Amino acid sequence: METYKENLPITAWAEDDRPREKLMGKGRQLLSDAELIAILIATGNSDESAVDLSKRILASANNNLNELAKLTVNDLMKFKGIGEAKAVSIVAALELGRRRKETESVKREKIITSNNVFEIFKPILADLPHEEFWVLFLNHAGFVLKKELISRGGIAGTIVDVRIIFKAAIENLSSAVILCHNHPSGNTKPSEKDIQLTKKMKEAGKILDIAVFDHIIVSELGYYSFADSGAL
C-alpha cells in the first residue's frame, strides 16, 4: 500500500500526508528532511514525486545535511527535475540554516576555552571546499568585539597579511585577537606556514601590546588549538 502511495503525485495523497499540509496542521518538527526539501522544490519529475526526488538527493549526500550543504547549484541540477531555480532554493535554504547556527554561536560572547572559538567558527568553516582565514577581536575581558574574514583562498591555502589583521585590531580597539582558519582536507595538523604565521603574529602583537591568545585550525572532524598544544 505504501508503494502505491509513493507512485502517486503528492496532490493525490491524503491531505495529512502532503508535506505542506502536514507542516501547517502538525508542525514543522514532524516533517522529515526529505519532506522539508520537497516543500522547497514543490514538484518532482515524471518518474518521482517531490518527496521521492528529495529522498534521492539526500541519499547522494549520505542522508547528511552537512554533506548536502557542500553541493553546488550545478551538482543539484544533475538530478532529473531539479532546474536552476529549485537548486538555488535548496542552496539558499541550507545557507540560511548555516547562518542561523552562526548567529547562535556568536551569542557566546565571552571566550574562555578554545572550544568556544570552535563553536563560533565550525558553522562557518567546517564545510567549505576552500580555505578562509578569520580573526576574533576581543576586549580586555575576553568578550568578542567583532569577527572578521581576512582572506579567502584555494584548497591548499590562503594568503594572510599581518598588517591587515593588526590594523583591524587597532580600529576595533582590541586588546587581543584569536586567529582561525580551516583545512578543507580534514587534517587539522598545522603546516609550517601556519606555524610561522602564528609566531610572526605573536611577535608583532607584543610590539603593539595586542595579545594573540590562540590560533585555531578547523575541519569537519574537529580542531587544533595552538594554545592548548603549547605551541603558542
Image: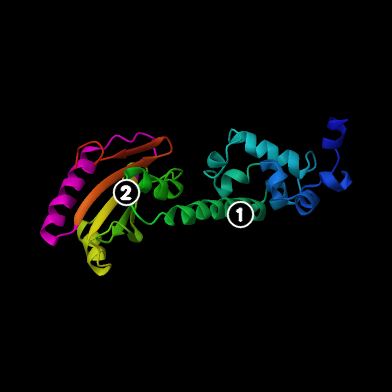
The CA span between labels 2 and 1 is 38 Å
Residue at the image position 54 percent from the left and 53 percent from the top? 95
| Element type where label 1 sits in the image | helix
**Tag 1: amino acid:** Val
Q: Which residues are magenta?
A: 182-210
Number of other residues with Cα within 10 Å of mark 2, as a class: few under 14, some 14 to 19, many 20 or more = few
The residue carrying mark 1 is 88
186 drawn magenta: yes
**Tag 2: amino acid:** Ile
Is 77 on the left-hand or right-hand side of 172? right
Q: Are marks 2 and 1 in contact (CB under 8 Å)?
A: no
The quarter of the picture where residue 142 lies is: bottom left
- Residue 145 versus residue 185 in the image, above or below: below
Residue at the image position 25 percent from the left and 69 percent from the top? 171
Which is more N-terminal, label 1 or label 2?
1
| Of the pair 10 and 29, the residue shown nearer to us | 29
